[in-house]
Image (tube, rainbow, N blue to C red):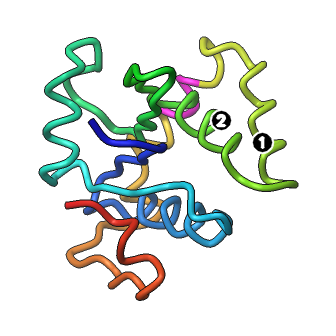
Amino acid sequence: MESGPVLLFDGHCGLCDAAVQWFLNRDTRGVFRMAPLQGETAGRILARHPELPEKLDSLILVEYVDGVEVVSWESRSVTRAAGYLPYPWAGLRWFAVVPRGVSDPMYRWMARNRAAFMGRKETCRLPSSDELGRILP
């Protein structure tokens, strides 16, 4: 089992890449690790969670709470992940008060249209030496 929060992301999505960069730039304590959905780490995690939707157009947050692996997706992955960031970014977690019936459809709309907004990536940015240990296969 892994430790600490892990953000799983679509390695070919420009919007997901931008989100990962956003989190890496604000995660000054180095809490997060990242892994592409197309990689080994995500494959192992996803296999343990049949409750996840079959087709995921989402950042997925994997947390370890009292030794239990907990996954969040769609809008909740973003609001829960924000809680790990330092002030003022941690305040974004309060958007979790928006009912999922409102926030998830908005998230899914963005996910469906992400290629139009941000394009697709054929290659990923190489992590800096500081980030290298935080990127999982």
Question: From the viewer's perspective, is residue 65 above or below residue 3?
Answer: above
At label 1, the amino acid type is Leu
Q: Residue at x 57, y 28 (%)?
A: 76
* Prevailing secondary structure class for the magenta stretch in the rendered image: helix
Which residue is denoted by mark 1 in the rendering? 92
Q: Residue at x 15, y 54 (%)?
A: 39
Residue 106 in magenta?
yes
Cα distance in 3D space between marks 1 and 2: 6 Å
At label 2, the amino acid type is Thr
Question: From the viewer's perspective, is residue 94 above or below residue 91?
Answer: above
Percent position (x, y) of residue 50? Answer: 20, 14
The reply to whether callout 1 and callout 2 are in contact (CB within 8 Å) is: yes
Q: Name the quarter where the C terminus is drawn.
A: bottom left
Query: Mark 1 or mark 2, which has the lower sequence index?
Result: 2
Q: Is residue 82 left or right of residue 133?
A: right
- In front: 30, or 111? 30
**Label 1 secondary element:** helix
Question: From the viewer's perspective, is residue 90 above or below residue 115?
Answer: above
Percent position (x, y) of residue 17? Answer: 42, 65
Q: Residue at x 22, y 44 (%)?
A: 42
**Label 2 secondary element:** helix
Which residue is denoted by mark 2 in the rendering? 79
- In front: 81, or 54? 81
Percent position (x, y) of residue 43? Answer: 14, 40
For the residue carrying disc 2, how many other residues have a C-alpha within 10 Å: few (<14), some (14-19), or many (20+)?
Answer: many
Residue 54 in magenta?
no
For the residue carrying disc 1, how many other residues have a C-alpha within 10 Å: few (<14), some (14-19), or many (20+)?
Answer: some
The stretch in magenta equals 104-108
**Tag of residue 114:** none
Q: Is residue 81 left or right of residue 59?
A: right
Q: Residue at x 70, y 40 (%)?
A: 83
